Image: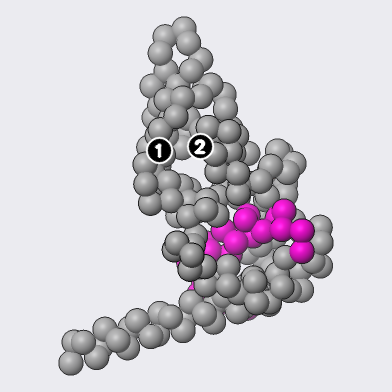
């Protein structure tokens, strides 16, 4: 965990983030969401309620989606974090992002980074979820615009895209092995 100089509330926090390592100083009471936005400049993670209700601040911490307004930056020190900025591969959108784009899974976009990352961990745990499982999987993320219909369709489309790419990769590997 982060080391705190005696008598000083400033700490250095290092994250393995979006495929790289970043370190910055911050107050020991800083929330992870504010550390990401204010110290690392990763403003794709949004601030909504700051009480753990809305999910706008969702990031992936060590493979699990968490609400970054409920975690101190110090608690994430040394751990692996993914934010929405880490999803695309250069200019190539992640299949989940493509699905939300194609299925109109957003309107104002405020909830979208959190929705995308909750979708990612949902599909990691359950690659072919039912509609009920999708609703349950994203119930911690509130959207005030879309009525959720297109978000559900986006998650279903994302699952299809990711399963198709897994199947293609597996069959290519089988061909190479032959
Ligand atoms: S800002 Fe974190 S849950 Fe709403
Ligand atoms: S798209 Fe506006 S809050 Fe979800």
Q: Quadrant of the C terminus?
A: bottom left
The stretch in magenta equals 107-131
In the figure, residue 176 lies in which quadrant? bottom left
* Residue 2 placement (x, y as % from top left): 40, 26
* Residue 81 placement (x, y as % from top left): 46, 47
* Residue 177 placement (x, y as % from top left): 18, 87
Q: Label 1 near label 2: C-beta < 8 Å?
A: yes
* Mark 2 or 1, nearer chain start: 1
- Which residue is depicted at the point 51% across and 37% down? 40
Looking at this view, is 5 or 100 the one in front? Answer: 100
Residue 30 lies, with reference to residue 33, above or below; the image says: above
> Which residue occupies the extreme top position in the image?
7
**Magenta stretch: residue 2 in it?**
no
- Which residue is depicted at the point 68% across and 50% down? 56
Residue 97 lies, with reference to residue 69, above or below; the image says: below
Can residue 106 be seen here? The reply is: yes
* Magenta span dominant secondary structure: helix
Looking at this view, is 142 or 172 the one in front? Answer: 172
Residue occupied by mark 2: 40
Q: What element carries label 1?
A: strand
Residue occupied by mark 1: 22
Side of 91 where 137 appears, left or right: right
**Magenta stretch: residue 109 in it?**
yes
Residue 170 lies, with reference to residue 141, above or below; the image says: below
Side of 74 where 143 appears, left or right: right
- Which residue is depicted at the point 60% across and 61% down? 116
């Amino acid at each position: 965990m982060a080391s705190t100089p005696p008598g000083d509330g400033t700490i250095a926090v290092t994250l393995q983030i979006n495929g790289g390592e970043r370190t910055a100083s911050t107050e020991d009471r800083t929330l992870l969401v504010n550390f990401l936005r204010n110290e690392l400049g990763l403003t794709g993670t949004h601030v909504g309620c700051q009480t753990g209700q809305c999910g706008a601040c969702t990031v992936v911490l060590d493979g699990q989606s968490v609400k970054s307004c409920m975690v101190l930056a110090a608690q994430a020190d040394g751990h692996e974090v993914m934010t929405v900025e880490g999803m695309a591969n250069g200019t190539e959108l992640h299949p989940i992002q493509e699905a939300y784009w194609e299925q109109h899974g957003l309107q104002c976009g405020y909830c979208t980074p959190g929705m995308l990352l909750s979708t990612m961990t949902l599909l990691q745990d359950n690659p072919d979820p039912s509609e009920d499982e999708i609703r349950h999987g994203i119930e911690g993320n509130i959207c005030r615009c879309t009525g959720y219909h297109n978000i559900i369709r986006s998650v279903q489309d994302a699952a299809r895209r990711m399963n198709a790419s897994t199947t293609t990769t597996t069959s290519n590997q089988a061909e190479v092995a032959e």
